Image (tube, grey):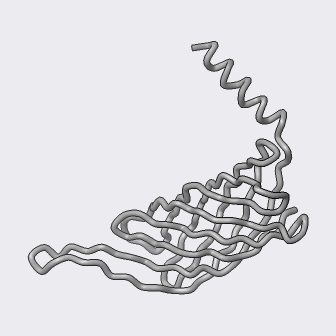
Amino acid sequence: MKKLLLGAFLLAGSFYATAQETTFGVKAGVDFASAKVKYDLGPLGSGTTTSSETGFFVGGFVTLGLSENFAVQPEVMYVAISDLNFISVPVLAKYSFAEKFHALAGPSFNYFMDAEEDEFKLNLDLGASYDVTENIDINAKYSLGFGDVAVNGVFVGAGYKF
């Protein structure tokens, strides 16, 4: 067991020793979302209702470089969509295909502030970003929601790295 722990620490340390850089930043943009609610009224039937709204998001992120082409990018965002407000915490894997183009993928943990029940939801996020300058990027991602109440959306925005 001690050898296993030592090996895990050495592996983690090697990632830290070869880490490219850690950057902090802020981001904001517009979201085009749809909320889908499944319902069951017993003998009266069941079905799904959907509504689409446009809103905005603002937040911050940290990019933790693990190698030249791979990083982990956790984010914290406030998302407002009509009557739906939530805090989203995506934890994205970031892979660089070229010097300025990056693919993003990972889970997004959401807390719905206006919900009376089912406040916590899990989404899957897939997207891309492009570095316009060393400090400014543009980004887009699709967030796929799961469960009886699912919020799916396209998020398009810009980020500024410190």
The quarter of the picture where the C terminus appears is bottom right
Q: Is the residue 87 above or below the residue 83 in the image?
A: above
Left or right placement of residue 54 versus residue 10 in this view = left
Report the residue at 85% width, 44% height from top.
Answer: 20
Which residue is at the far right? 134
Report the residue at 84% width, 33% height from top.
Answer: 17
Q: Position of residue 153 (x, y in %)?
A: 53, 75
Left or right placement of residue 60 versus residue 89 in this view = right
Which residue is at the far top? 2
Count of residue discs = 0
Q: Position of residue 49 (x, y in %)?
A: 33, 82
Which residue is at the far front? 98
Image-quadrant location for residue 133: bottom right
Report the residue at 69% width, 59% height from top.
Answer: 103
Q: Position of residue 107 (x, y in %)?
A: 55, 55
Q: Position of residue 113 (x, y in %)?
A: 50, 70
